[in-house]
């Protein structure tokens, strides 16, 4: 049996499950809010054109209005100054969008400190328990933050000092970017950097280091609790937007159930 036939057989007999990791996209989906003087993207909305009526008697359709970085989305290298000569969304190689998932659970640390930053030693400890990070894989950071995914205020967790959401330290971001063969990282929060990422050196180091090294970032993931630490396959499906810096994406994981 070929590998493709084996996968299809697993899907047919439900020994391979599909887990949807995508936050549903609507006008109420929480979005990033940048402080002044920076400009914000528009939120997602639908503009009805017809609904089985005179403008379209047999169909219903809408125009879509949205920023690129809304909901579950992938950041392409051209999004950041360090990756300005790199791929836009349309030119990301498809083989980089499918790969093994490595799920790193830091819920306990985040429960104690919402500003928790993943360190290199945390990744090394995961590797000791699970083996090396997979080639062309995706490091998915399970923080439990997806429980806030439909609540704008809780999702951003902002006060007078800024947004307080977990992320990755500058040192770990540089290490992932330069010392691993990962395709990228995925997080449950609104952006791939921590809420206070502007205070790190360089500012927003995950954006700076990963996108500058042809690695990608996925945000607003859900259901990471349904994935094993190793063994799942991630599938990222963005729109191939020419010159796009990001795209809302459907993200799936394929999981083999134990025999």
Image (tube, rainbow, N blue to C red):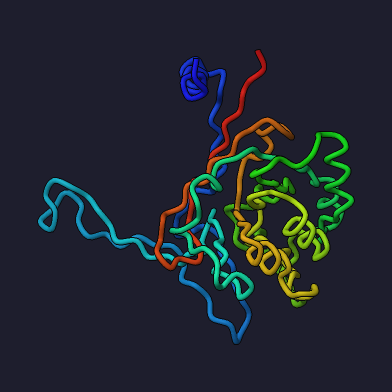
Task: In this rendered view, identify the residue nearer to me: 72 or 132.
Answer: 132
What's the residue at 66%, 46% (across, down)?
138
Q: Is residue 153 above or below residue 135?
A: below
216 lies left or right of 5: right
Locate the C terminus by quadrant: top right
**Above or below, 227 relative to 257:** below
Query: 165 above or below 199?
Result: above
Q: Residue at x 67, y 62 (%)?
A: 210
Q: Can residue 54 be seen from the camera position used here?
A: yes
Image coords of residue 81 (percent x, y): 61, 75
Lateral position of residue 87 relative to residue 114, left or right: left
Who is closer to the viewer here, 27 or 12? 12
Q: Nearer the viewer, residue 241 or 83?
A: 83
Instruction: Where is residue 199? Give x, y as percent.
Output: 78, 75
Image quadrant where residue 108 sits: top right
Residue 26 rendering spot, x and y as whole percentages: 45, 55
Residue 251 visible at all: no
Residue under the image location 74 percent in, 75 percent down: 203
Please report the residue visible at 19 percent of the width from the left and 56 percent of the height from the top. 50
For this rendering, which residue is in front, 51 or 24? 24
Q: Quadrant of residue 244?
A: bottom left
């Amino acid at each position: 049996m070929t590998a493709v036939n084996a996968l299809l057989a697993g899907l047919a007999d439900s020994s391979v499950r599909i887990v949807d990791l995508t936050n549903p996209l609507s006008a109420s989906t929480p979005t990033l809010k940048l402080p002044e003087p920076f400009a914000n993207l528009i939120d997602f909305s639908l503009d009805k054109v017809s609904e089985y009526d005179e403008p379209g008697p047999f169909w219903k359709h809408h125009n879509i209005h949205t920023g690129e970085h809304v909901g579950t989305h992938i950041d392409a290298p051209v999004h950041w100054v360090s990756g300005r000569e790199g791929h836009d969304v349309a030119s990301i190689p498809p083989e980089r969008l499918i790969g093994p998932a490595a799920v790193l659970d830091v819920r306990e640390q985040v429960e104690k400190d919402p500003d928790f930053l993943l360190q290199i030693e945390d990744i090394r400890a995961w590797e000791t328990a699970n083996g090396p990070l997979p080639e062309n894989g995706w490091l998915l950071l399970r923080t439990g933050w997806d429980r806030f995914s439909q609540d704008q205020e809780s999702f951003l967790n902002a006060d007078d000092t800024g947004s307080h959401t977990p992320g990755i330290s500058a040192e770990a971001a540089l290490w992932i970017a330069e010392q691993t063969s990962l395709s990228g990282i995925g997080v449950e929060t609104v952006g791939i950097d921590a809420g206070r990422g502007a205070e790190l050196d360089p500012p927003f180091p995950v954006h700076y280091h990963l996108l500058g090294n042809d690695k990608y970032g996925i945000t607003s993931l859900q259901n990471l609790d349904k994935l094993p630490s190793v063994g799942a396959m991630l599938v990222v499906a963005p729109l191939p937007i020419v010159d796009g810096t990001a795209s809302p994406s459907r993200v799936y994981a394929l999981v083999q159930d134990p025999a």
